[in-house]
Image: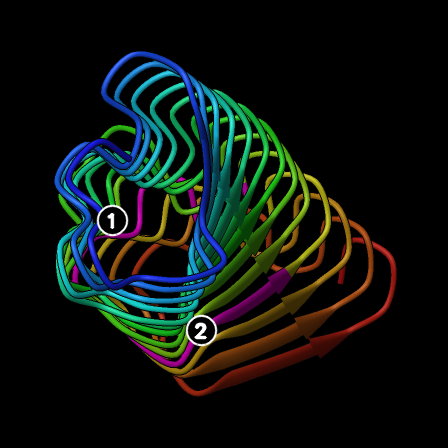
Amino acid sequence: GQSTTTGDFNSALGNNSLGANVTGTHNTAIGDFSLALNTGNENTAVGQGSLEANTSGASNTAIGKGSLASNTTSDNSTALGFEAGYNSTGAQNTFLGRKAGRGVTSGTENTFVGNSGGRDSTITGDYNIGIGSVPLNALTSGSNNVAIGRDTLAANTTASNNTALGHQALAANTTATTNTAVGANTLQANTTGGPNTAVGKGAMASNTTGSFNVAHGFEA
């Protein structure tokens, strides 16, 4: 914090940590270049390059090398894990896990928990929840999706308002909206069909483009 003049209650440990801070208060930076450009308040950055680009953003917590590295002015985000939320510039996001939410850019109020969920695309959508290994990994502008389980909604790009609970539920879904799949492999092959509701392991597993269907039961 070599630039700090009137800012109070700051802690800095590491090369250029809090290097640009002048008036920001209640910040903690541990690791080289953590909060290097910070002027905001109440941020916590632990790990090399964590919250490195943050300027006026406040009340952010980043733990792990490169976590929330691109955040500049947004507030109230939390990232825990190597490069978690690395590209995020939106507010009120939560990323827990290695590279969790790495693809999120301007999207807000997204939650990714687990290894690499939302990692490989450019996500501008809001209010998405991905829990497990690589859920919502192709997501772009889709919003209000819930994916819980490995590879759930893995191919989903622009579609919104889908719910997938269970291993590979709605795994192939791309642009179809308003589908509900509960159970392993439910609506697994669905691509553009919707709305559909499938409850039970393997229910409607072979459906691809069909819409307005309801299936309840094992492999129904």
Is residue 104 left or right of 109 when viewed as pictured?
Answer: left
Q: Amino acid at mark 1?
A: Val
Identify the residue at image location x=77%, y=56%.
Answer: 183
Front residue of this view, candidates 133 and 100 = 100
Q: Residue furthest right?
A: 218
Q: Answer yes or no: is residue 159 visible.
A: no
Could you tell me if residue 131 is visible in this image?
Answer: yes
**Which residue is depicted at the point 51% across and 25% down?**
64
Looking at the picture, tell me which residue is in the foreground, 95 or 55: 55
Where residue 125 appears, as percent x and y from the top left, is: 21, 68
Residue placed under numbered mark 2 in the picture: 162
Q: Residues within 10 Å of mark 1 (few under 14, many from 20)?
A: many
Residue 58 vertical position relative to residue 190 in the rendered view, above or below? below
Decide if residue 78 is on the left or right side of residue 131.
Answer: left
Image coloring type: rainbow
Identify the residue at horizontal 73%, vertical 50% (top origin). 166
Across and down, in percent, residue 111 comes to: 50, 60
Q: Which residue is mark 1?
A: 104
Identify the residue at horizontal 24%, vertical 39% (top origin): 103
- Picture coordinates of residue 31 (x, y %)? 43, 18
- Residue type at mark 2 is Asn
Segment tinted magenta in the rendering? 152-164
Q: Residues within 10 Å of mark 2 (few under 14, many from 20)?
A: many
Whether residue 207 appears in magenta in the rendering, the answer is: no
> Could you tell which of marks 1 and 2 lies nearer the N-terminus?
1
Q: Is residue 37 above or below residue 128?
A: above
The percent coordinates of residue 204 (x first, y second) are 60, 59
Q: Quadrant of residue 43?
A: bottom left
